[in-house]
């Protein structure tokens, strides 16, 4: 055992692999992290936070990061295009988490234009400078990591990961697609090569829709961590072996204290996609108040014992910061189908 809870997860001989929730814009917030930790998720990432805004704005700090004493182990992901912002933001947040991660995978146009996300793959010196500079400031019981996408050939991808390893990262997360790919199957062969070419733990991200997928991919690639985004969003019980959202997870969600109706309802739309018949889903997706949402689930799924405060949630957002949310329209209502919202943010799941 080390004094680092994240490294201890990777070193645990009883774990075939570490089960991890991806950083998802709007969705991997505290309440969702609470839920999936009840269903065998070992490690959670926050949504990406813009490092410059986090440093400059107390409002951004309050709105973009929430945690509590049970929310561990936890990795905070930052978007940064220079080491100064990355280090300064990390120093502010590190007492409240177990490690920080640099986003080098977001393929959105705004990110590429501003030098964030996947654009950093074309500027590896910035990635290495961010890691080296933070490594000089980081306590030994905290991790530093990088999450990236593949380059256009295997050798380049392996070389980049080896360069990043040499700067002192604790682990590397690799999304198995390039920045230009969307729905193509992930490149497991490249992930296998990367895992065999570095000594730090490698986390595989992409195409994990159920626990069987995670087991099969881990056995082929050898990666020490399996990270899910869309799969766990639709089914919070994924890592516990459930094929669809267990009814108990809906009950648990309704008993977690929430602060915003839109996020509360959006998650339920995903979770209930296969629990409700099509006509009921259409009605449920268009509900506009927390009271109606709770009453509907009580009637359709025989849910009971709902936390009273969740019946009176408002629609006011807590606020967002930075260009990261520039292209995300916050719905005035929640009249959507799950696949619509997934399609609109698929690339933000890095």
Image (cartoon, helix red, strand yellow):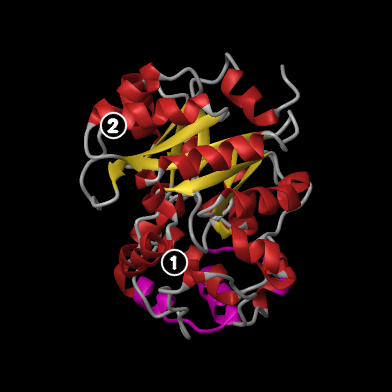
- Relative to 294, is 61 on the left or the right? right
Residue 51 drawn at (x, y percent): 60, 58
Q: Please provide the residue range marked out in magenta.
A: 280-309
Front-lying residue, 239 or 151: 151
Q: Give x and y (percent) for residue 219.
A: 35, 20
Work out which quarter of the rendered image holds the N terminus and state it. Answer: top right
Residue behind mark 1: 269
Q: Magenta includes 282?
A: yes
Residue highlighted by disc 2: 156
Who's the residue at 31% across and 74% down the image? 279
The correct choice, above or below, for 6 with respect to 293 in the image is above
> Principal SS element in the magenta part?
helix
Q: Residue at x 67, y 80 (%)?
A: 312
Asked if residue 188 is among those painted magenta in the image, a careful observer would answer no
Instruction: Tell me residue 342's x, y (percent).
Output: 35, 62
Residue 305 in view: no
Q: Earlier in the sequence, mark 1 or mark 2?
A: 2
Rendered position, 267 above or below 331: above
Count up the numbered dots.
Answer: 2
Mark 2 burial class by Cα count in 10 Å: few <14, some 14-19, many 20+: few
Residue drawn at x 61%, y 62% as measured from the top left: 52
Give coordinates of residue 239: x percent, y percent. Answer: 48, 37
Q: Along the line of sight, which residue is nearer the eye, 134 or 229?
A: 134
């Amino acid at each position: 055992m080390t004094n680092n809870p994240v490294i201890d997860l990777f070193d645990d001989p009883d774990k075939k692999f570490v089960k991890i929730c991806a950083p998802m814009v709007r969705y991997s917030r505290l309440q969702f992290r609470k839920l999936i930790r009840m269903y065998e998720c070992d490690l959670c990432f926050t949504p990406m936070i813009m490092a410059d805004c986090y440093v400059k704005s107390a409002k951004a700090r309050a709105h973009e990061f929430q945690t509590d004493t049970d929310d561990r182990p936890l990795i905070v992901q930052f978007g940064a295009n220079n080491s100064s912002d990355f280090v300064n933001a990390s120093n502010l947040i590190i007492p409240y988490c177990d490690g920080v991660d640099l986003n080098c995978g977001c393929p959105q146009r705004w990110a590429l234009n501003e030098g964030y996300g996947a654009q950093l793959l074309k500027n590896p010196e910035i990635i290495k400078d961010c890691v080296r500079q933070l490594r000089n400031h980081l306590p030994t019981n905290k991790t530093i990591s990088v999450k990236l996408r593949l380059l256009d050939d295997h050798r380049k991808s392996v070389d980049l990961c080896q360069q990043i390893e040499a700067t002192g990262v604790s682990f590397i997360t690799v999304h198995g697609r390039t920045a230009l790919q969307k729905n193509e199957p992930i490149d497991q062969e490249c992930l296998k090569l990367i895992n065999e070419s570095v000594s730090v733990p490698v986390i595989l991200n992409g195409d994990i829709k159920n626990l069987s997928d995670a087991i099969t991919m881990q056995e082929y690639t050898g990666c020490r961590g399996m990270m899910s985004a869309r799969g766990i969003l639709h089914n919070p019980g994924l890592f516990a072996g459930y094929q669809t959202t267990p009814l108990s997870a809906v009950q648990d969600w309704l008993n977690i204290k929430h602060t915003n109706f839109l996020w509360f309802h959006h998650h339920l739309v995903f979770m209930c996609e296969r629990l409700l018949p099509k006509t009921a889903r259409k009605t449920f997706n268009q509900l506009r108040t927390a009271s109606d949402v709770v009453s509907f689930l009580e009637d359709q799924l025989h849910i009971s014992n709902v936390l009273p405060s969740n019946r009176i949630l408002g629609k006011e957002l807590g606020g967002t910061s930075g260009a990261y949310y520039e292209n995300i329209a916050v719905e005035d209502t929640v009249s959507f189908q799950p696949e619509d919202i997934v399609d609109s943010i698929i690339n933000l799941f890095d």
